[in-house]
Image (cartoon, helix red, strand yellow):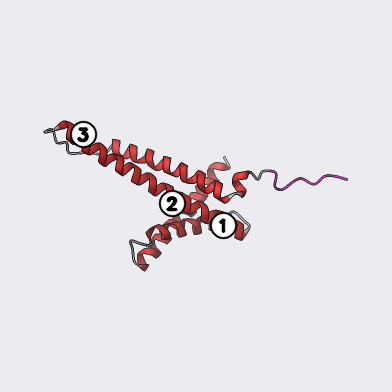
Amino acid sequence: MAQEPNPFKHVTFMDTNCAAKAAMVTVAGGAMGFLMALFMNAVEMRDMDYGRTKQSTRYVLRRDINKMFGMAKGFAIFGAFYSIFECQLEKLRIRDDATNSFLSCMFSSMVLAAESVGWKGLMMSGLGGGMFGGVMYYVQIKFMNH
């Protein structure tokens, strides 16, 4: 009797555990946001006050560090929401496709924009986030197949 191949052979712990995936994505998103903010602050043009150098340097560093941690926090929160939504959609729909990515980015964008915009802005934020998610899914598939 021939043994049937195991269809779940490639499934790992991170594929089945939504909490572990969300935690990893949160940490990685925070690190990516911090590094992106570090780069953006490095290339930013500034007006320098040459009067009191020590105080102005301290002020600029404090402001830059606050911006870096703010961007890191934003990336981490978006990554956590995206990961949780995507994992739950995969389990509900029992498939991994561009629709999951579109809906996950849409929901994540809408949750983050909920406090600051009205319903029209919320819908536009969701649409923009969803389109970003769909495009990123196809970019990911393109690079994984080559």
Q: Residue at x 29, y 38 (%)?
A: 41
Residue 50 seen in render:
yes
Residue 70's label in the rendered image is none
Secondary structure under tag 1 reads helix
The x and y percentages for residue 4 are: 80, 47
Secondary structure under tag 3 reads helix
Say which quarter of the image contains residue 35. top left
Q: Give the answer, above or below, for where 94 lies relative to 140.
A: below
Q: Give the answer, above or below, for where 58 lies relative to 86.
A: above
Q: Residue at x 14, y 36 (%)?
A: 49
In magenta segment, residue 7: yes
Q: What range of the chain is rendered magenta?
A: 1-9
**Labelled pair 3, 1 in contact (Cβ < 8 Å):** no
Residue 135 seen in render:
no
What residue does disc 3 label?
57
Please name the amino acid that badge 3 sits on: Thr
The x and y percentages for residue 84 are: 52, 54
The first of marks 3 and 1 along the sequence is 3
The first of marks 3 and 2 along the sequence is 3
Q: Give the answer, above or below, for where 88 lies relative to 9.
A: below
Q: Nearer the viewer, residue 47 or 65?
A: 65
Please name the amino acid that badge 1 sits on: Gln
The x and y percentages for residue 96 are: 59, 54
Q: Nearer the viewer, mark 3 or mark 2?
A: 3
Residue 88's label in the rendered image is 1
